[in-house]
Amino acid sequence: MGTSLDLIPTGTVFTPEQITHYADSDTRTLEQAIADADLLVATPHSGAAIPEEVAEFLSPELTRRLQYDFSDVATASIVRRWAEIDPRIVAVINPHPRLIRDPNRRKPDDVRADLAAAIERVRAAGAWQKVDLTGVDAIRPVTFSFFPILEIPETEAGLQRLVDAFADTAEQGLGVYERTREVLTDMFLEHGLTHGGAFTRLSFHDTMNTTTTRDGAVNVARAEADRLPDVVALSNRGDHQGEERDPADRPTMDAAALRALAEAHREGFEVSHPEAVLLNQPYLGSEEIRAAGARFGAMRAEAGTAGLRLGAVQAEFLREYLLGPDAAAELQEPGTDWVAEDPAHIDAIAHACKRAWDAYRDAQ
């Protein structure tokens, strides 16, 4: 494997069919898959390859390892495999990296203004220095270890060209993902409101408990408050029991259901101690579940959803767990390349996901 960046060829436009996955797609239609399923799995950060249209704006210091680390790349292959083996789910996988725009953040009303604000904060802090991008991080000019991922043009015209390139390119993949996710949600709801049952939207992520250094070693420990449990954090915007934390920020999934889902994950992933699966720690869940939860709540208030149980949950897996110990150890060392995926490990994690959700259904 080379150390050059992984780029999507110029002009590549993804279709909904390319990014939608379900079991037996050669013999079942999408409509049949949705009729059999009760779970839509979305992976907003799974893309790592960067569209060639924005390559000119990338920092010359960006390596393949830093590129991949700035994604939830382990989630794509696992969710694709899960969709192959589990007829109860449909999955939609974002083909674009969060670099283009983060679909798990609210889409800015003015992308250019937000990006300009982020750039100014980064410039004021200095290269590799910690900077607070709260509220303007839908497009980040730095990674989470504050590596300057974009080479920002100095002129107003250059900045406008950058923003236009990002906005135009987003419609070729990220925009397809967002629209497909909502079309699939509509199809699930239409079927569920007619036939009853349950529909859950799952936003599937991973995060390492360490961040990168300048030499590519992913070995700087996160602050204790930011560290994930040994397997997964399940989030519904609630407290550590899944109960309401803030009346203005209602849980996106029933608290008892979330606790049952946590127990099902402890069973399905065969954890050695209960704290390997935690609720709303360290993350509460972001825009994908907030938007879905708000929509489901409005539906209940306006027309009712009798006979249909609705929920939205974020799963933030420990990336070291998803990659496996050998790959995680390799990333602790300096380097410029990413690790090779282990098909057997991917298959094992996918089957654990299926076991967990099967156990959850059995408990309902």
Image (cartoon, grey):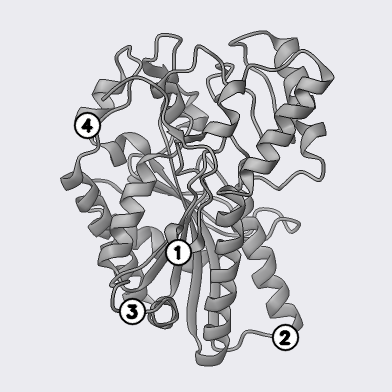
Residue 215, position as x, y percentages in the image: 40, 9
**Badge 3 or badge 4: first in the primary sequence:** 3
Count of all numbered marks drawn on residues in the image: 4
In the rendered structure, the answer to whether residue 265 lies left or right of residue 154 reads left
Mark 4 and mark 1: span between their CA atoms?
34 Å
Name the kind of residue labelled 1 in the image: Glu
Mark 2 and mark 1: span between their CA atoms?
32 Å
Q: Which residue is mark 1?
A: 17
Q: Is residue 258 above or below residue 219?
A: below
Residue 176, position as x, y percentages in the image: 58, 56
Q: Secondary structure at mark 4?
A: helix
Task: Specify the quadrant of the image occupied by residue 137.
Answer: top right
Q: Is residue 194 above or below residue 247?
A: below
Residue 173, position as x, y percentages in the image: 55, 49
Q: What residue is drawn where x is 74% and y is 28%?
A: 161
Label 1 CA crowd tier, 10 Å (few <14, some 14–19, many 20+): few
Q: Which residue is mark 2?
A: 303
Residue 28 circle label: 3
Query: Which residue is more in the foreground, 263 or 114?
Result: 114
Query: Which residue is more in the foreground, 93 or 239?
Result: 93
Of badges 4 and 1, the one in the foreground is 1
Q: Is residue 142 above or below residue 101?
A: above
Q: Which residue is mark 4?
A: 325
Q: What residue is drawn where x is 63% and y is 64%?
A: 293
